[in-house]
Image: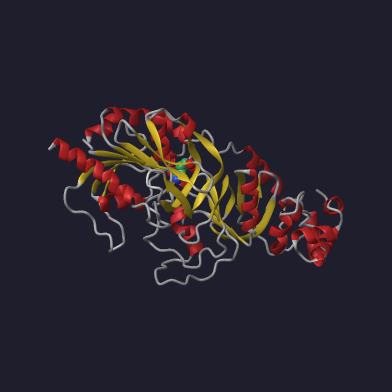
Amino acid sequence: MDIDRIIEKAGGADEIAALAGVGLEAVRKWRQSRMVPTKHWPALLRVPGIALQDLTADLTTTETPQEQERETDVSNPCPPGANAALVLADGTVLWGRGFGAHTEGAVGELCFSTGMTGYQETLTDPSFAGQIVTFTFPHIGNVGTNADDNEAPKMAALGAVVKEDITAPASWRSHEPFAAWLRDHGRAGISGIDTRAITRTLRDNGPQTAILAFPENGRIDTDSLLNRARQWPGLEGMDLAKEVTQPKRVWTQGVWETTRPARTENRRRVVAMDYGAKDNILRCLVTAGCDVTVLPATATAEEILELKPEGVFLSNGPGDPAATGTYAVPAIRTVLDANVPVFGICLGHQLLAQALGGKTYKLERGHRGANQPVKDIETGRVEITSQNHGFAVDEKSLPADVKVTHVSLFDGSNEGIASTTKDAFSVQYHPEASPGPSDSFYLFERFVAVMDRRAKAGA
Ligand SMILES: NC(=O)CC[C@H](N)C(=O)O
């Protein structure tokens, strides 16, 4: 919308300044330069009728001759100081500074994570395949990266959107600066972005496709980027577990914390289904007392049962659980019919819900961060959890023999289920943390306790 029209509609510049709580000067400047300093965006976005694109409108309207020259080059409207852009499918163009690997345009679902730490774990969590991550915490990259904090060998997330420019690593654990690490993983980041404004847009309007461009030649054609973003089909219906799953392997490493030694007695034989498993889940299973064989997402029930597991674990993973369910659910059903205990996390929770007869749906607002409160319905205890999901289990679809065990205190959506007839339970959140608190480690112990009980009964 034209800025003058917005101001007119709101009843004048004074009105907008008062509503937003910013100085009249800021609104006047906006009118003159057609560009609002990013620090005023959050306030102005609270004013009814003002959208993100209004604040970035006419960024190419410039005054210096050099800038006027740029203006005539329609294929490269990069404003001064910018060499990368994030283009949202709604037409918003956000200019910034690129870092990491060059990309002509990485396209995927734009999401935001509120975690204040753990950017390396977040970006290597395979569940972020198909997504560009905006970090709401402004200082990202400032403790560098190291060889231990990757959650998978490859980085699945498509890119990182951050507010402040990346500073030199300030941590004795750092092996490599964030930007170099990102480049090694073939991914780009963009800084100088008002991540709070993006967060508001995603919060208010739901998930959105975006494209992150940091081209080597510095030329950015926003129209063609917008076209590409608009053509991307979205995560719904997309099976991405197959893309990130790893071949069969035996996992033996436990958690880092020396305060939590691994159980050495009566270890339990567990098959972990890898739909995009985070390494720290496997570590938690080992520490809790499991000998873990990891099988790829497409493993059949026969391949699983051949290993004579005392329990089967269903991992987290990217994409639409309904799409992955087409091949994963039949295998899980056979495992359940064979009376083997099952424990699932995140995508694993969504797949277990389907195998037990339930359905999943896409959330209006995904949950991503390390401080999400969840209530255990039986005990009334509240856990602060780590989360990363954009789909959820539809509680109304659950059959009578499946009970709801956990609920989100943010939006009331489902966070956990258990079968009342089988030893099968799962949670939507991430008890392995990484990043996040470890309030929910007890779930790994609960899984082992089920197998202990079975072993005792059978002995
Ligand atoms: N972390 C996960 O396992 C995510 C599950 C699923 N891809 C979702 O977005 O809901």
Question: Horizontal placement of 391 versus 174: left or right?
Answer: right
Q: Nearer the viewer, residue 391 or 76?
A: 391
**Could you say where residue 116 lies in the image, as x and y percent from the top left?**
50, 61
Tell me if I can see residue 120 in this picture: yes
Q: Quadrant of the C terminus?
A: top left
**Could you say where residue 258 lies in the image, as x and y percent from the top left?**
28, 63
Colour convention of the picture: secondary structure
Question: Horizontal placement of 422 versus 192: left or right?
Answer: left
Which image quadrant is residue 437 in?
Answer: bottom left
Tell me if I can see residue 155 in this picture: no
Residue displayed at 79% across by 55% down: 58
Q: How many marks?
A: 0
The relative height of residue 97 versus residue 125 in the rendered view (above or below) is below
Which image quadrant is residue 78 in?
Answer: bottom right
**Could you say where residue 101 lies in the image, as x and y percent from the top left?**
53, 57
Q: Nearer the viewer, residue 257 or 415?
A: 415
Residue displayed at 48% across by 59% down: 119
**Could you say where residue 271 lies in the image, as x and y percent from the top left?**
27, 40
Question: Horizontal placement of 438 versus 219: left or right?
Answer: left
Which image quadrant is residue 175 in?
Answer: bottom left
